[in-house]
Amino acid sequence: MSLSPIPQGVYPSVTHISPQKLAARGIKLVLADLDNTLVPYKVTEPPAEIVAWKEALEQAGIALFLLSNSRKPGRAQHFAEKLGIPYQGRSGKPKKAGYLRAMERMGARPQETVMVGDQIFTDTLGANNAGAVPLLVEPIRLAGNPGRYIRYAAEAPFRLLGKRRPFL
Ligand SMILES: [Mg+2]
């Protein structure tokens, strides 16, 4: 475990993360962020490509779990139920408690778990903190909130370092 903000690989989107390659690395559990990772902010239904990715994970023997910091009432629950996966809203990332609770619920050890998310200072930092493998994806959409561009710029050095050490 560490307080590192460096991910192990940066991927264009979650569907670029191969279930077969994850399984080959011994992964049993994928914790996924919601906003700007699986869908843009405000999108409430899982699109077809996310449904297909979840099914491919299952076929590879890997469970998908929604680990969201969303404070919008019902948002994480609704999305997870539509996708048919377990979830935890208001997870408190980057604190490790939410990750540890999710892994315990799912019966997976940290070294069998990856966290897929779009933000270094929540998703990646928390995964490293909890001992899980941090995979970063490009945010789906930065438009709509100027703060997102500023944050993305602040993340740039860590994104670069993460590209040099891909997990897959
Ligand atoms: Mg996000």
Image (cartoon, grey):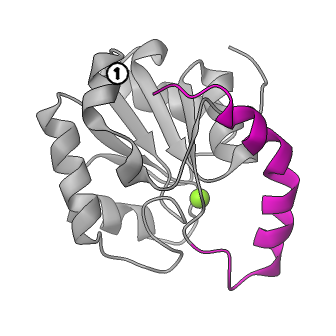
Query: Element at badge 1?
Result: loop
Locate the C terminus by quadrant. Answer: top left
On screen, residue 167 versus residue 23, left or right, reads: right
Q: Residue at x 32, y 68 (%)?
A: 78
Residue 23 image offset from top left, x and y in percent: 27, 23
Number of residues whose C-alpha sits closer than 10 Å to that of mark 1, classed few (under 14), some (14–19) or many (20 or more):
many
In front: 112, or 166? Answer: 166
On screen, residue 122 versus residue 48, left or right, reads: right
| Amino acid at pointer 1 | Ile
Q: Residue at x 17, y 30 (%)?
A: 60
Residue 81 visible to an observer of this rendering: no
Furthest residue toward bottom: 144
Decide: is 13 above or below 97.
below
Residue where numbered disc 1 is placed: 27
Query: Does the stretch in magenta take in 165?
Result: yes
Query: Does the stretch in magenta take in 166?
Result: yes
In front: 88, or 161? Answer: 161
Q: Residue at x 69, y 39 (%)?
A: 94
Locate the N terminus by quadrant. Answer: top right
* Boundaries of the magenta span: 141-168
Disc 1 C-beta below 8 A from ligand 1: no
Furthest residue toward front: 164
- Our reading of the magenta stretch's main secondary structure is helix
Report which quarter residue 95 is drawn in.
top right
Quadrant of the picture in which ligand 1 is shown: bottom right
Residue 86 image offset from top left, x and y in percent: 29, 46
Residue 90 visible to an observer of this rendering: yes
On screen, residue 33 versus residue 9, left or right, reads: left
Q: Residue at x 23, y 49 (%)?
A: 54
Decide: is 154 above or below 162.
below
